[in-house]
Image (cartoon, grey):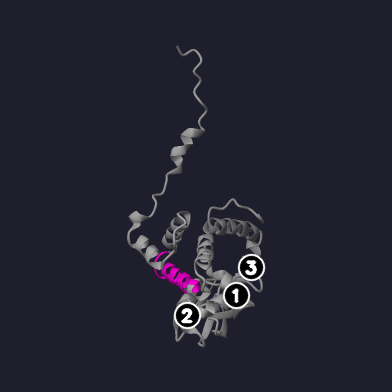
Amino acid sequence: MRGSRDFANRQDYAACLQKVFSALNASRQERLDEERPHLGAVPKRPLDSYQRAEVRVSKWSTIRVRKNTYSVPSRLIGARLQVRMYANGIELWSAQTCLERIPRLHGCDQLRIDYRHLVDALVRKPSAFAHDRYRTELYPTHTFRLAYDALQDAHTDCLCADKVYLKMLHLAAKQTEAQVDTALACLLACNAAIPVQAVQHMLDDPAQNPSVVDVQVYDGLLQPPVSVEGVR
């Protein structure tokens, strides 16, 4: 089963595991029936399915959990949070309120940095972007990276380029990343300037974006040519 790709989703994988466990446990059913009368009562409430930890949010808006680093919203900088670690995710709690749910990293020294957590603070202090320790994580797609490079080429002042890029990133965080990506790709393809106003205009007026081509219409070009033998 290791390395198998025969499961469409996690639920199918879990169902397969349950069948395997049931088959393994079938041979032990007789002994279980012998022990059952001697077992204690089941707890009235389910046992916690998570482990707890206390963390403090760093000045970089990150936390360290089990030797891995996660970003959290910048408004939480300096706060102490309770972490609930599940098998596949972690929850951040404060004052009996769940603030955030994040997919869990496995292994050590890995990063899960969400630019949406950091962009508000960077917009207020754009000079920090050039030296941000997680800067490579602040390009959501290759298009954003190309747009940043184009801004660097277009502005002699690097800080000015950073300010414009962070405004683009802020648009992606507050509106739709995919639409901002499409708008940037269109401007880059036209070798046009990339002002924030142009991107915002394309978001407000989707008709300005190039239409999506249905590539299936090209399937006909892949058909073998029709023979003309015998045609008079």
Alpha-carbon neighbours of circle 2 within 10 Å: few (<14), some, or many (≥20)?
some
Alpha-carbon neighbours of circle 1 within 10 Å: few (<14), some, or many (≥20)?
few
Q: Could you tell me which quadrant the N terminus lies in?
A: bottom right
Q: Is residue 229 above or below residue 184?
A: above
- Residue 135 on image: x %, y %: 57, 73
Q: Is residue 23 above or below residue 129?
A: above
Q: Secondary structure at mark 1?
A: loop
Which residue is at a point 52% across and 58% down the rendered structure image? 11
Q: Secondary structure at mark 2?
A: helix
- Residue 61 on image: x %, y %: 53, 81
Q: From the image, tell me which residue sits under label 2.
A: 121
Q: Give, as a three-letter code, the residue at label 1.
A: Leu
Horizontal relation, residue 22 to residue 91: left or right = right
C-alpha gap between disc 3 and disc 1: 10 Å
Q: Give, as a three-letter code, the residue at label 3.
A: Glu
Which residue is at a point 47% across and 72% down the rendered structure image? 166
Which residue is at a point 41% across and 49% down the rendered structure image? 212
Q: Give, as a three-letter code, the residue at label 2.
A: Ala
Dots 3, 1 in contact, CB < 8 A: no
- Residue 182 on image: x %, y %: 44, 58
Q: Residue furthest front?
A: 156
* Res 47 → quadrant: bottom right
Does residue 53 show up magenta in the picture? no
Q: From the image, tell me which residue sits under label 1.
A: 39
Task: Return the disc, 2 or 3, that comes first in the chain's sequence.
Answer: 3
Does residue 175 show up magenta in the picture? yes
Q: Which residues are magenta?
A: 161-176
Residue 34, numbered circle: 3
Q: Could you tell me which quadrant the C terminus lies in?
A: top left
